[in-house]
Amino acid sequence: MLAATIKLLGDKGYQGIAKLHGNSQTPVKKVKGADLSPIQRQVNRSLATQRIVIEHVHRSLKIFRILSERYRNRRRRFGLRFNLIAGIYNYELNHSA
């Protein structure tokens, strides 16, 4: 279980996560036949701008195929390999032009 201080940001597919973790945030869904208010649109937009950062990181890590395909090597080395790939990503992020 996650600590209560960790904030979870999810998309519309994670609507039920609030029942499991109190410090979670998902976009407001549009009710059938009605539009979202401007405040609800603004909240959804600010959530999307926060989430896009991690989505770009996921995309970059999927290039290494450790997240996008089935891991076929020894399970005990998964954490080591994932940390190495994350280190490479962080190095490139800090030393790019």
Image (cartoon, rainbow, N blue to C red):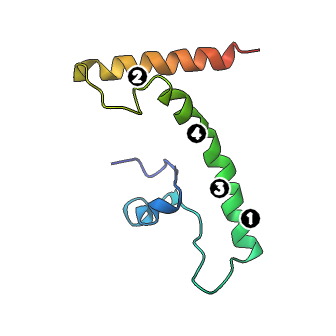
Q: Is residue 22 visible?
A: no
Which of 1/35 is in front? 35
Examine the rendered structure and indicate whether residue 1 appears above or below residue 16: above
Q: Position of residue 90 (x, y in %)?
A: 58, 20
Q: Are marks 3 and 2 in contact (CB under 8 Å)?
A: no
Q: Residue furthest bottom?
A: 33
Q: Which residue is depicted at the point 49% across and 57% down?
A: 23
Horizontal and vertical percent for residue 62? 48, 30
The secondary structure type at the circle numbered 1 is helix
Q: Residue 19: x percent and y percent?
A: 39, 66
Mark sitting on residue 54: 4
Q: Which residue is mark 3?
A: 47
Q: Are marks 3 and 4 in contact (CB under 8 Å)?
A: no
Name the element at disc 3.
helix
Give the labeled residue for mark 1: 42
Q: Residue 66's image quarter?
A: top left
Which amino acid type corresponds to the residue marked 1 in the rendered image? Gln
**Earlier-in-chain disc, 3 versus 1:** 1
